[in-house]
Image (tube, rainbow, N blue to C red):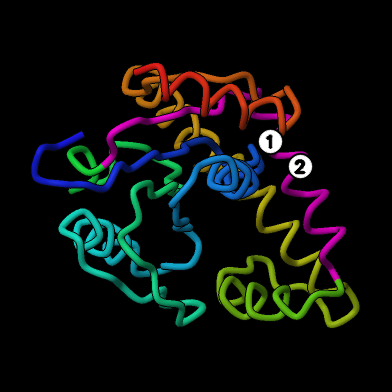
Amino acid sequence: MSEKSKVFVLGIAGPSGSGKSTLVVKVAALLKDSETMFYDDYQPNYENLTKNLGELRKGNSVTNPEKNRIIQPRKYIVIEEPTGRQRPGMKDKIDFLVYINIPLEVSFVRVLLRNLEQSEDDGINSFYETIGPQFEPKFSEKPTKLMHIMHWQLKMYLQEHREIYLRDHLNNLKDADLVIDGMKSKDELANEIVMKFQQK
């Protein structure tokens, strides 16, 4: 931890569907005086996540743009950051990086299953509106929004996302302070993370 900061930042990286968000919550619950930050809350302005983290390390409070919640500079900040230390400006802000190592096909299936399970949620409407202009070919009105979204995700996975995940995988394996087995239960992983980083 930097001598200039009294805030210890624990980052959790991994592909979509690896369980980053769940682990962030569980790890923070095991630590006293902790706060959480989530990558998805900052879309599409992810650079603000880096800026806010920098402010917290200086001892300043910030506002979560998605939930309009004040985040205080606690002793520990547990952050979801898919690309780990690779995002510009993030390298010197994460003190301890955990990488969830999981087969890509497993994480991708989890994403698709999550879509099915959340298909009645209001969130699917905003996701549909975001990616709708990218649909090629255009479907008729008969298929559901969920079908549109899953078609887009499958196509994008084959065209570019798989390559991006593989690149991030290699970078995170190199940068991580701790690599964990994403096939284990989230409670088991949360305990492993806390135990390992407290030994540092």
Query: Which residue is depicted at the point 52% across and 28% down?
Result: 194
Residue nearest the viewer, comparing 99 with 78: 78
Q: Residue 64's quadrant in the figure? A: bottom left
- Kind of residue indicated by mark 2: Arg
Label 2–label 1 contact, CB within 8 A: yes
Percent x, y of residue 66? 48, 77
Residue behind mark 1: 107
Residue at far front of view: 32
Q: Circle 2 sits in a helix, a strand or a loop, which is it?
A: helix
Residue 196 lies in the magenta-colored region: no
**On the rendered image, what quadrant is the C terminus found in?**
top left
Which label sits on residue 174? none
Percent x, y of residue 127? 64, 72
Percent x, y of residue 89? 18, 48
| Left or right of 200 on screen, residue 121 | right
Q: Residue 132's quadrant in the figure? A: bottom right
The correct choice, above or below, for 158 with respect to 42 in the image is above
The correct choice, above or below, for 59 with respect to 172 in the image is below
| Left or right of 196 on screen, residue 157 | right
Residue behind mark 2: 110
Identify the magenta region: 94-119
Q: Circle 1 sits in a helix, a strand or a loop, which is it?
A: helix
The correct choice, above or below, for 190 with respect to 123 in the image is above
| Left or right of 127 on screen, residue 11 | left
Residue at far right of view: 142
